[in-house]
Image (spheres, rainbow, N blue to C red):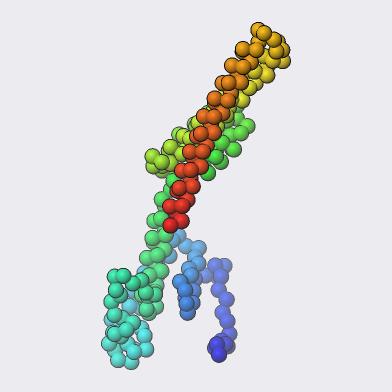
Amino acid sequence: MTRIPDSVAVASLDTHRLIVAVPNHGPAEVSCNLPRPVAASVLRQLADGLDSPAGQCETALMTGRPCPVHDAPASPSETPRPAGLDALLGYVAASMADEEQAAEQPAPLTPGDVRDALAFNADERDQVLATLRDVLLDTTAPRDPEQALGAARIILAAHAQQLAALVEAERTETHTRWGLNRSTRGVLTGYSSARRTIRTYADRLADEQALAEGAANEQAGQ
């Protein structure tokens, strides 16, 4: 049977600055309203205060010597759950410091970021030009050559669709004003041919970007 405690204490960040929950199985959970470096420092101080050369398990406490099981050096190929509260606190503190360092790294530029910028600039006088401006100005998001190429494909594909729409508008204006006759037939045909060529280019860029994103997603899933 599972032991039922006589009472349950409830703690929250309304009354505590730092809460560490250590389940019987699974990783420890940390909640805090302190800056993460400060919380990591507090946990390290607790770990230092609880540190004991004899370890913390029952065998170590009874014999006064390190336990050959719990205090044995871990194999380099293994990542066991830390034994003893001191080691656990040190482990959690190090994890919080690593997470803080990782959080400081800005997220790279993604295709979704570029498409979001296009959507955001939909009401601008020139949507594509405004998006190109924003992407070039956003120096906080790092990008490698492939990410930069993806951004270029998305922006140029949108620009090509924009040009195709302008050509179609010119064709419609010419047809409305002058109609279809021997004089305008060649001009209207030229407009249609130019529109198809530009849209074919836009579609090719979109297809290449879709293939690149599919390959990147497949690689990430491996």
Residue 33 shows up from this direction: yes
The image quadrant of residue 44 is bottom left
Residue 18 shows up from this direction: no
The quarter of the picture where the C terminus appears is bottom left
Q: Residue furthest bottom?
A: 62
Residue 199 horizontal/vertical position (percent)? 56, 28
The quarter of the picture where the N terminus appears is bottom right
Please name the residue shown 33% across and 72% down the image: 78
- Foreground: 52 or 45? 52
- Foreground: 215 or 112? 215
116 w.r.t. 39: above or below: above
Residue 203 horizontal/vertical position (percent)? 54, 33
Residue 46 in the figure: left or right of residue 194 = left
Please name the residue shown 41% across and 63% down the image: 96
Please name the residue shown 50% across and 34% down the image: 205
Q: Residue furthest front?
A: 182
Please name the residue shown 58% across and 34% down the image: 121
Residue 52 in the figure: left or right of residue 180 = left
Number of labels in the image equals: 0
- Foreground: 129 or 28? 129
Residue 89 in the figure: left or right of residue 167 = left
The image quadrant of residue 160 is top right
213 w.r.t. 183: above or below: below
